[in-house]
Image (tube, rainbow, N blue to C red):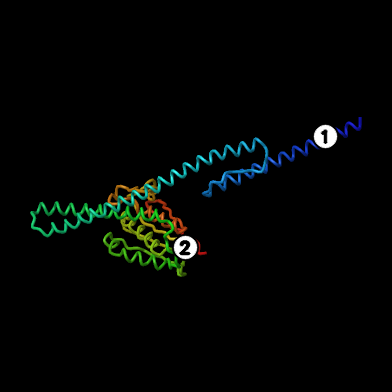
């Protein structure tokens, strides 16, 4: 009797060991699937998930995931291809529009040299205004399409951020003065040096200043901290939280800015992301704050 008891205990021990080994193998296979799946989602590769386990259930699971990965890659390829075609189409269309617009403006110059009635002069003035506006919007669309199509074309160099910021504000002196906006600039005493594309950073500042001209009630505060955070703040009673939250959306404009494609802040965000930084907007108590966080200096 005692011998049978020991035999039973031995058999149970063997079964327990086998079950533990089975559980370990399943656990290992699950970890392999988890790791491989995460890798396939973040890397552009055609390699499928393969596991070391011979368990039929786990292998069926891996095969099922591989089927979905194939579908996902196909959809991703279609999206990338469609997005590229759209960018190229926008670039070509905006480029094609520039030539006839230039010709129209040229003929308007010739017309203005001719003797015309007062009514004809007024009509010509209206046409000139609309042609210049359309030319401005087409140029902005063309620049945007170029920026999003050439993500790796930036030329990085050590840049004094405060200096670029001051130069950008100075270049907008006349436009700010016309809107009776006196900027209050507070820069850290320490130089903020970052390896960035100088022209891209200048473009970001210019687009933010254009935004101020559109929406500011007459004030502008700009701060640059030693950590590389830049904040543009102005009163914008014509906006609300929903509108402020959509300022970075492509082609989004509010009623107060009809003479715009809505691409200025979208371009600013795209450029900042390409440089490894971030940009965001917050609206509170009629104050619009746009914050730029520059990448850390490596």
Give whichever of 32, 224 is nearer the camera. Answer: 32
Residue extending farthest to the front is 46
Residue 37 in sight here: yes
Q: Establish if 293 lies above or below 90.
A: below
In the rendered view, does 66 fall on the left or right side of 203?
right
Secondary structure beneath disc 2? loop
Give how far apart the Cα atoms at labels 2 and 1 are.
Answer: 68 Å
Check contact, mark 2 vs mark 1: CB within 8 A.
Answer: no
In the foreground, 215 or 78: 78
Q: Residue at x 40, y 62 (%)?
A: 201
Q: Quadrant of residue 114?
A: bottom left
Point 13% across, 53% down: residue: 122
Query: Disc 2 or 1, which lies upstream in sequence?
Result: 1
Within 10 angstroms of label 1, few (less than 14), some, or many (20 or more) residues? few
**Crowding near pointer 2: few (<14 within 10 Å), some, many (20+)?**
many
Residue 116 located left or right of residue 241: left
Instruction: Tell me residue 192's x, y (percent).
Output: 46, 67
Percent of width and height locating residue 219: 34, 59
Q: Quadrant of the N terminus?
A: top right
**Which residue was labeled with disc 2?**
228
Q: Residue 250 at what x, y percent from top left?
A: 37, 48
Tell us which disc is closer to us: 2 or 1: 1
Q: 229 left or right of 86?
A: right
Residue pictured at 30% horizontal, 65% vertical: 173
* The image quarter in which residue 117 lies: bottom left
Residue 11, label in figure? 1
Residue 215 vertical placement versus 17 (above, below): below
| Tag of residue 132 | none
Q: Position of residue 194 (x, y in %)?
A: 46, 65
* 65 on left or right of 83: right
Please say whether residue 287 is visible from this viewpoint: no
């Amino acid at each position: 009797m005692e011998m049978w008891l020991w035999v039973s205990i031995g058999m149970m021990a063997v079964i327990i060991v086998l079950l533990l080994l089975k559980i370990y193998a399943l656990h290992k296979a699950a970890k392999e699937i988890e790791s491989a799946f995460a890798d396939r989602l973040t890397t552009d590769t055609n390699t499928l998930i393969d596991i070391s386990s011979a368990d039929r259930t786990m292998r069926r699971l891996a095969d099922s995931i591989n089927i979905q990965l194939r579908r996902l890659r196909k959809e991703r390829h279609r999206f990338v291809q469609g997005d590229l075609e759209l960018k190229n189409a926008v670039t070509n269309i905006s480029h094609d529009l520039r030539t006839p617009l230039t010709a129209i403006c040229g003929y308007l110059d010739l017309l203005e040299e001719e003797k015309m009635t007062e009514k004809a002069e007024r009509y010509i003035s209206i046409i000139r205004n609309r042609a210049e506006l359309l030319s401005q919007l087409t140029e902005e669309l063309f620049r945007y399409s170029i920026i999003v199509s050439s993500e790796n074309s930036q030329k990085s160099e050590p840049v004094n951020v405060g200096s670029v910021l001051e130069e950008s504000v100075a270049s907008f002196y006349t436009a700010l003065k016309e809107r009776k906006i006196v900027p209050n600039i507070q820069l850290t005493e320490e130089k903020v040096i970052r390896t960035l594309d100088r022209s891209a950073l200048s473009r970001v500042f210019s687009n933010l200043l254009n935004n101020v001209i559109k929406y500011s009630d007459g004030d502008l505060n700009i701060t640059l901290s030693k950590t590389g955070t830049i904040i543009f703040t102005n009163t914008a009673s014509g906006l609300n939280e929903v509108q402020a939250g959509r300022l970075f959306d492509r082609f989004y404009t509010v009623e107060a800015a009809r003479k715009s494609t809505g691409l200025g802040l979208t371009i600013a965000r795209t450029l900042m992301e390409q440089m490894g930084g971030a940009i965001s907007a917050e609206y509170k108590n009629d104050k619009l704050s746009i914050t730029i966080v520059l990448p850390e200096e490596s």
